[in-house]
Amino acid sequence: MFGRIGPMELILILVIALVIFGPRKLPEIGKAIGNAIREFKKHSSKVTEELDEAVQGANEDPKIESAKKPDTKEASGSKKS
């Protein structure tokens, strides 16, 4: 009942916003809202990517990972020679 906004309700909301803020402020408000939504989407996708990477890292076999990484003692010992 309250979750759907039809075209008439949207027009009513826009008319009320026009009366309250005036015609000069509406483009600025729209631009600010657009920027806020864009930043929110960018940060939420970044968080989703980080969570996916963390889950993939937790699911990998640690034995395979240790075989891929060079031993730090051997790497530092060869540089001293």
Image: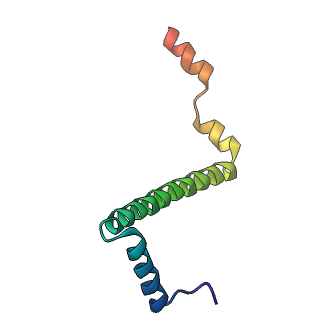
Q: Residue furthest left?
A: 24
Classify 16 as above or below 25.
Answer: below
| In-front residue for pair 19/72 | 19
Give how far across and how far down residue 81 sits, in percent.
50, 8
Q: Position of residue 48 (x, y in %)?
A: 57, 57
Determine the image quadrant of residue 28: bottom left
The quadrant of the picture occupied by the N terminus is bottom right
**Location of residue 19 by image quarter:** bottom left
Q: Residue at x 53, y 58 (%)?
A: 44
Q: Tell me: residue 24, above or below residue 71.
A: below
Classify 30 as above or below 66. below
Q: Is residue 60 left or right of residue 17?
A: right
Q: Residue furthest top?
A: 81
Q: In the image, is 4 to the left or to the right of 18? A: right
Identify which residue, 28 or 59, lies in the foreground.
28
Viewer-side residue, 37 vs 66: 37
Look at 65% across and 54% down and name the residue there: 55
Indicate how the structure is coloured in the image. Answer: rainbow
Report x, y in % for residue 32.
39, 60
